[in-house]
Image: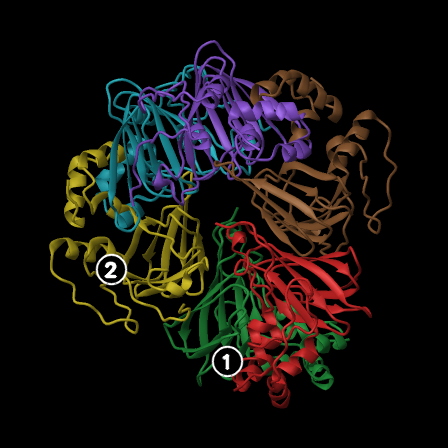
Chain colours: A cyan, B yellow, C green, D red, E purple, F brown
Amino acid sequence: MSILQTLILFSFLLSASQASVQDFCVADLSPPRAPRATPARRNISNLIKAAVTTAFVNQFPGLNGLGISLARLDIAPGGVIPLHTHPGGSEVLLVLQGSICAGFISSSANTVYLKTLNKGDSMIFPRGLLHFQLNAGKGPALAVVSFSSPSPGLQILDFALFANNFPSELVEATTFPDDAQVKKLKGVLGGTG
Amino acid sequence: MSILQTLILFSFLLSASQASVQDFCVADLSPPRAPRATPARRNISNLIKAAVTTAFVNQFPGLNGLGISLARLDIAPGGVIPLHTHPGGSEVLLVLQGSICAGFISSSANTVYLKTLNKGDSMIFPRGLLHFQLNAGKGPALAVVSFSSPSPGLQILDFALFANNFPSELVEATTFPDDAQVKKLKGVLGGTG
Amino acid sequence: MSILQTLILFSFLLSASQASVQDFCVADLSPPRAPRATPARRNISNLIKAAVTTAFVNQFPGLNGLGISLARLDIAPGGVIPLHTHPGGSEVLLVLQGSICAGFISSSANTVYLKTLNKGDSMIFPRGLLHFQLNAGKGPALAVVSFSSPSPGLQILDFALFANNFPSELVEATTFPDDAQVKKLKGVLGGTG
Amino acid sequence: MSILQTLILFSFLLSASQASVQDFCVADLSPPRAPRATPARRNISNLIKAAVTTAFVNQFPGLNGLGISLARLDIAPGGVIPLHTHPGGSEVLLVLQGSICAGFISSSANTVYLKTLNKGDSMIFPRGLLHFQLNAGKGPALAVVSFSSPSPGLQILDFALFANNFPSELVEATTFPDDAQVKKLKGVLGGTG
Amino acid sequence: MSILQTLILFSFLLSASQASVQDFCVADLSPPRAPRATPARRNISNLIKAAVTTAFVNQFPGLNGLGISLARLDIAPGGVIPLHTHPGGSEVLLVLQGSICAGFISSSANTVYLKTLNKGDSMIFPRGLLHFQLNAGKGPALAVVSFSSPSPGLQILDFALFANNFPSELVEATTFPDDAQVKKLKGVLGGTG
Amino acid sequence: MSILQTLILFSFLLSASQASVQDFCVADLSPPRAPRATPARRNISNLIKAAVTTAFVNQFPGLNGLGISLARLDIAPGGVIPLHTHPGGSEVLLVLQGSICAGFISSSANTVYLKTLNKGDSMIFPRGLLHFQLNAGKGPALAVVSFSSPSPGLQILDFALFANNFPSELVEATTFPDDAQVKKLKGVLGGTG
């Protein structure tokens, strides 16, 4: 078993939307990829302006059974890691460069925890709770995040609602937005139904 | 330690919004409570038309350390248990009466699993994933759900976004709805900011 | 992996004695099966008058890794789920119909916890402890039970002692009944030795 | 926290029956105690002729959180550790002196595993399953057992059925012995009801 | 419970030797502390030339129950994090600046895994195994490490052998160095006995 | 699955050094093996004078999934189980014969816990911490040890440092002995580099 490996580039945006959207590329880890030109991908690029490079067990088999994994976040000015959860693990974040506004919402009481983090600051996101990271500065922001599982999973809220074939009438019946709003976001994120 | 107890009524809607919204009351478990008349509570009543009666460790201390808990779902015609997650446990549901349309969305691939369940049907909702239950029939629906934890937690999407002081500009920046939509749902669910 | 399935009928009596003994069949889940006519099976039918329909991981593969499983208990008037343990998980029971007398015996101190449960009542049976359920009413009783494991296991005391080839002299030396009693119960339950 | 301690003598018979019944005393670990003279205790002494000296977390606090505990078994000629379970842990046994016949019964299939063990032989008893140890030789037998938990618990079948106030009619309804048999064993083991 | 905190400076050298030895201080996280002048501390400074800043549960209570913790490593040119283990968790390391030679030794087979890591490279150190990190470049090296536990613990080999009152004759009898060597290293590291 | 097995002889010295060094053989468990005559093996024999007979999951497959394993220690007069760790489990030791001096060193504070144990005495060694056992009497010592894992692992300090190809310059840079000392111990234990 190979326990010793270097990080392999993997964008969750890629896996979620089957499209390359690394607007803010990690220069020394992999060559930039020219994004192909479908409207959905262009829309997502404009929304996100960020890349997540994961070393989960799928990319880094040496992690198997060791209860931990790692990722780096690169967020361009104006970029955001949208509201999401990790169903399988807690997350700890350490800012390496720039300024990040991060937050999560607690279970049951729905309390919102917000914090602006600068270089050297750290924040915990407990397992399974909705959270986000946003570039709060003028230059690029860089952070490393670590998870309490080799496969923490990832569920991005907007992708779960609007980037698949979840029927619009069920989205509306279970989350209460207007039909026009649902149709608009499905258009942006490439969803159907 | 008292290991032997009967179910104590507890509505998650109550705990989330500090308001009584048990439109469809569990007749033999607790007396109906007359809902007070604030607009937010009335709006939620019209949206939900359902009650969840939990036997989590907080209500049922004998569950402590035993890795399990229970709840019953009562969903009136037209009612819904809105999209939500349990950060701390998987859920299994068994329909006892009526017809329920249930679904969840998988991690990473965002695949939507939908199923109409009738009396005697069962369905699994893996830990931490977004899921919902909807009355799919003309009469009341009743189900029992069980969790792989004495304290599975509960995060209802709309309450996490719109029933607290999560700043509208951050909701918009991290989930991409229009400002008018956010303001409207905050109005319905009693949120501010 | 199929995560979505409906309950498959499975009687633990069937698996334990290799005979069909569903006296009180679950009408909407499976067709009744005509019991074959050996004396042992007839004897067990008269003793038990109950059926357990499990959704353990063997019958419901989607439960794998999710830490939970489900079963329903149907107990005819005069019927009983005999004293047994689940070596692999705790159990929570919810009465849906009728009246059930249930009990378990604690570890070390051997304290007996007994309770008569009616519709809507719930009770916990901690992992690995001897417990039973008995129809305490005049009509049929129905309950749903859930376990803190996808494969909680089942060890029915009388089957462990008298329905196999456990030598009578060892049964007597380790549990202290009379030889005639052991021989009689082996006769009823189909054991040898 | 004191992590370093020597074994403290503790007889499970003592805790179960509130009586000293160490017929076969562990000479160098504790002084023998003169058994008091009630009929129940004398009866148990004649049945058991064995002592269990445990180092569980209650007697040996340094075990807390470490996932392990230890006990020694001293079984006089003709003695037996009666059929019992450990709800909280698996057991491994190593014979140090003499000859022991040991066995357990599997979950679901009720298969009986029997083995005569001599000095240096080892056997596993999986968590929660009924098992026993019996002196199979002419001299005293000595074994050390270890558990996969600091508090594995102990439920001796006969004590759970006959050494407490478990009502005879419920014992009979859930385990199917004759009333006379139940009354007789309650007499031997000091039970009531 | 405060879940949201920034990193608190904590040097394991400090806790191990009761002396401040942060030769290579983390400029933006805490002010440098002037090391006091005992010979042992000066010796350790010359040996180590590194600082570890931990965010374990003791310094960062929000980590409690979340299965993860974080630390940063600052290693000056010629510096080293000496051979050590974390008894309670696996470690993943990500190099942020400079060049680090890292290694660990496997259980049982004693295979040595060595790797020179540059910026962006990552390496896993499985729970409980001896490992080290060494500055392999000419400038300062910086890395972030994360652990699969909120309290992974730390046992530095030389401190365990030579910085306490472990009797020299026992050190020699159980690890086989010469007496002069043990006395010399006890002198360097401040041990006695 | 075979759950029932007797102990199979396995020496960790054998696996570590690829040589038979059972100076103090377990007479009734396996035939003595004539040690082959390389200098390294002779040196180790003179250092250790002890044998460990393990029943880990590799030798005893019935332990799989049961959270426990067992070993016996035979230590000749003047013999020692050298300083080592078990990365995967805590250990509890029970002295059966003779007198043993045992010790472990705590995490972080490096406190040394030492104890002389006689027949019937027990001691705990928490997971992952350095510990040793030494014959403290004039005759042979015998102990049984149990672990909180079916595969606790074993890392003997001297074998990790000096019985492989760990480069001497890295041993010296990360543990601070003299070069001559490292070369000498590599010579004794058969290491290279």
Camera-side residue: C85 or F123? F123
Mark 2 secondary-structure assignment: loop
Marker count (numbered): 2
Residue E140: quadrant of the picture: top left
Residue E121 vertical position relative to residue F4 in the rendered view, above or below: above
Could you tell me the amino acid type at mark 2?
Answer: Lys
- Residue at the spot 57% in from the left edge and 53% down from the top edge: D5
Q: Position of residue F23 (x, y in %)?
A: 81, 39
Q: Position of residue E10 (x, y in %)?
A: 38, 30
Mark 1 secondary-structure assignment: loop
Camera-side residue: D62 or E93? D62
Residue B48: quadrant of the picture: bottom left
Residue C43, visible in the rendered structure:
no
Output the chain of dot 1. Answer: C
Res C76 label: 1
Could you tell me the amino acid type at mark 1?
Answer: Ala
Residue A177, visible in the rendered structure:
yes
Camera-side residue: E33 or A37? E33
> Outermost residue, bottom direction?
D180
Residue E147 vertical position relative to residue D159 in the rendered view, above or below: above
Q: Position of residue D62 (x, y in %)?
A: 53, 52
Q: Quadrant of the C terminus of chain F?
A: top right
Kindly identify which residue carries mark 2.
Answer: B49
Res B107 label: none
